[in-house]
Image: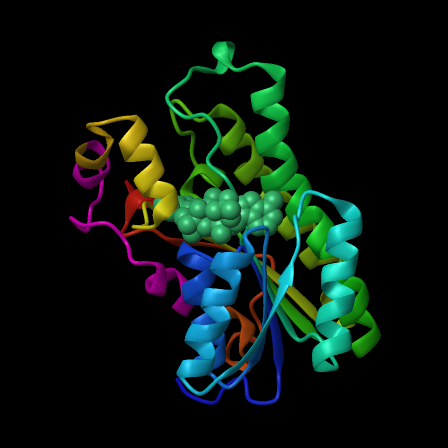
Amino acid sequence: MSGLLTERVALVTGGGSGIGRATARAFAAEGATVAVADVDPEGGHQTVELIESDGGRASFIRADTSIAGEVENMVAEAVRTHGRLDCACNNAGIEGRVGTTTIDYDEGDWEHVINVNLKGVWLCMKYEITEMVEQGAGAIVNIASIAGLVGLSGSSPYAASKHGVVGITKTAALEFAKQGVRVNAVCPGVIDTPLLDRIVTRLPGRKQFYLDAQPIGRLGAPEEVAAAVVWLCTDQASFVTGHAFPVDGGFVAG
Ligand code: NAP
């Protein structure tokens, strides 16, 4: 692909690291101008620099996607700076405490993961879809997980949040299909990012466990997830909405 998103504006949350950074760069490689949002200004600015050094256009917006006012401001700033909003990838997410069973989580662990991973995606869609309906078109991709499709031992609030992301993706897709807004989810498998590094540092042995569980025999790269996100935002995916698309090396096929 090249130039499939020329003159379009894309917003990526959690764009300062991992899958978000790869997605922001992939949007820019297709010609989109990218608003890179993240709670971490350092990572976000680095992503903008990488896009600019590749010859693309990008800006940084600091936003915590679990806070309504910051999300409203993020979408408004993207539109104010770049004139419109055509594509959004709601990617910001956290793993929370892993390796603990359902009965051992406390309320604080639970609420933190749900607030960032589920409420955050809902808040992003709330303001993005409002803008896209006014424009008469738009495409959103929410980053869920294989844990949004199947259970994942030791990650109860994470799995709950990601199943929730799949649910609100399908619901919003039905609600806004006739208004020109497509909403899909991508469900990554085990992807080699700083999030995964944190898990395997805390739980030695997990990396081999994940590798053994991959039908394809290796971990995924962030760029392999980004390619699916960008395709779903192009006109090549014009008849695709309400889909939860695994990019998982075959994991959920088993
Ligand atoms: P990552 O490398 O940790 O990157 C996530 C980025 O989001 C970081 O820059 C992080 O900032 C930022 N962030 C965290 N909370 C935020 C908030 N409330 N508001 C705005 N930004 C926030 O993680 P990743 O592996 O790329 O994961 C990206 C998404 O893919 C997540 O939704 C994750 O659940 C999903 N996913 C990942 C995998 C995997 O194997 N890696 C698999 C399935 C799904 P800080 O670093 O400052 O926290």
Residue 118, relative to residue 124: is it above or below?
Answer: above
Q: What is the span of residues highlighted in magenta in the rendered image? A: 209-230
Which is more toward the observer, 137 or 15?
15
Q: Position of residue 44 (x, y in %)?
A: 52, 61
**Quadrant in the rendering for residue 165:** top right
Q: Position of residue 247 (x, y in %)?
A: 37, 55
Q: Is residue 195 rendered to the left or right of residue 43?
A: left
**Quadrant in the rendering for residue 17:** bottom left
Residue 67, relative to residue 71: is it above or below?
Answer: above
Please, which residue is most extreme toward the front here?
42
Q: Is residue 236 rendered to the left or right of residue 1?
A: right
- The residue lying at 39 percent from left, 22 percent from top is 154
Q: Position of residue 30 (x, y in %)?
A: 47, 83
Q: Quadrant of the C terminus?
A: top left
Which is more toward the observer, 57 or 8?
57
Residue 231 in view, yes or no: no
* Magenta run includes residue 228: yes
Q: Quadrant of the N terminus?
A: bottom left
Residue 21, relative to residue 185: is it above or below?
Answer: below
Q: Is residue 214 rendered to the left or right of residue 178?
A: left
Q: Position of residue 75 (x, y in %)?
A: 73, 64
